[in-house]
Amino acid sequence: MERQHQLLSKIATNDRHGENSPYFDGWKAYDKNPFHPTDNPDGVIQMGLAENQLSADSIIDWIKKHPKASICNPEGVHMFKDIANFQDYHGLPEFRQAIAKFMGRVRGGRVTFDPDRIVMSGGATGANELIMFCLADPGDAFLVPSPYYPAFYRDLGWRTGVQIVPVDCDSSNNFQITKVALEAAYDKAQQDGINVKGLIITNPSNPLGTTLDRETLKCLLSFINEKNIHIVCDEIYAATIFSSQNFVSVSEVIEEVMDCNRDLIHIVYSLSKDMGLPGFRVGIVYSYNDAVVNCGRKMSSFGLVSSQTQYLLASMLSDEEFVEDFLAESSKRLKKRHGIFTKGLEQIGISCLESKAGLFVWMNLRHLLKEQTNDGEMELWRVIVNDVKLNVSPGSSFHCVEPGWFRVCFANMDDETLEVALKRIHAFVGEQKERETLSTKTKDMPSKTKCWKKNLRLSFSSRIFEEGIGSPIAMSPHSPLVRART
């Protein structure tokens, strides 16, 4: 192995991809034993993948009604040669115009975007890496409020050499970002000799499902202007809002902050979450800095959106009536699904952080921990994945400073699968309560700290994996691990 490593690059052999994280281990467990309602009803249900499948039927209906939008059928094939030969890294003009208009519509029409500042990339993963290449050198760092998306280690740093400096947030104020926490993280980095080049935030948050209010965004802009560092706002969940409150984008706030240096402001966007199109690999960097736009365009040659995809989406996103109806219906369905899932959890005493956006909940299982440590969290997580057969993501993989929080995705499955998942959770929690009751009555019974066993007597089959989490698992070529952005 050592000799093989000598033949490869440092990027190829380092471990900064983050695949060894429990976040990805849960995907491997699902890949080994995927749930199917008839073919494999005892398999693992994938609740670790933030996909939006709830409104796919609306897009399918639109495609059926607009066959000319595709170059791969008789109605649209007359454009095949032109589109198939198009390779300008600026992108199709009509695509950039449609994306800019859609971004404005998602933000309530309160702000407009310049099509000439749209820079394409291969999904939000590629967009985040592209902006890092533009803004930072190897060894430089970006502040990132925790808990944060586990694959940021891969997206921001694997190939760029950029470091992540966590800004620790906790449940005492519902994980809100504070100036005090930002200053502490920045000062600690400075003391450690780390060159901080910027701050990256996700708004709406992954994994919290919360949004930043106007005053917090102004505070962040004040902070980065004071330090003369960049801010990258990852807004890929902007249209997943399911509350009555509007989403506030940094693009709105800079219009209100007169002394803001716009050269420091950059937005990452995608159609993976808002439209439920992760496979289309549409990532966008929108920068207010001319040099970043010019450099980013050149770099985008390594991860362009296919011209066929651009052509289809330019037509779809230019259909204002469709966009209006789609966004309204998507929000309605997300709200309904979120309500069903959280109410199902409340019935058994499980609470979630109050949220208004996203494709997931931030579930609080601290009361079920054997001990209030990361080890206690991991022990509970292994039971949930191996025995309850649900792939949920532990908070420690999101760099959460408090053990016992889990991200659970609810929009990547049909109603029937969600019902099965809730039944499994109910059965598991019910057994824990039963064992707690018995242990308090009988001195000889195991205490709460010993109550988890691998032969859970649930209302569904709970055969254990022959190879549990932590064992080497061969990946299939169709593994969700190839899905770059979750």
Image (cartoon, grey):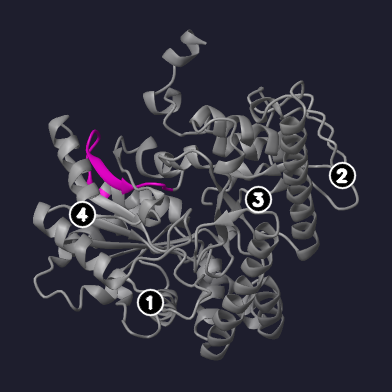
Looking at marks 1 and 4 on the same chain, the residue that comes earlier in the sequence is marked by 1
Please tell me the numbered disc located at residue 47: 3
- How far apart are the two marked residues, 2 and 4, measured between alpha carbons? 48 Å
Q: Could you tell which of marks 2 and 1 lies nearer the N-terminus? A: 1
In this view of the protein, which residue sits in the foreground, 108 or 186?
A: 186
**Taking 40 as reference, is 352 left or right?**
left
- Determine whether 323 is above or below 221 in the image: below
Disc 3 to disc 2: CB gap under 8 Å: no
Above or below 115: residue 435 = above
Residue nearest the observer in this picture, 342 or 153: 342
Q: Badge 2 is on which residue?
A: 460
User: Residue at coordinates 63% horizontally, 38% vertically from top-left?
Assistant: 26
- Badge 1 crowding class, 10 Å Cα cut-off, few under 14, some 14 to 19, many 20 or more, is many
Nearer mark to the viewer, of 1 and 3: 3
Magenta region, residue range = 134-148
Q: Earlier in the sequence, mark 2 or mark 4?
A: 4
Residue 343, image x, y percentages: 66, 65
Q: Is residue 460 left or right of residue 120?
A: right
Residue at x-position 57% and y-position 61%: 359
Compute the Cα span from label 2 to label 1.
49 Å
Q: Which residue lies furthest to the right in this view?
A: 38
Q: Name the residue under label 4.
A: 179
Cα separation, mark 1 vs mark 4, equals: 32 Å
First in sequence, mark 3 or 4: give its number: 3
Instruction: Judge the density around disc 4: few (<14), some (14-19), many (≥20) Cα neighbours within 10 Å.
Output: few
What label does residue 100 carry, if any?
1
User: In what element is the residue under mark 2?
Assistant: loop
Real-space CA distance between mark 3 and mark 4, rounded to the nearest whole angstrom: 33 Å
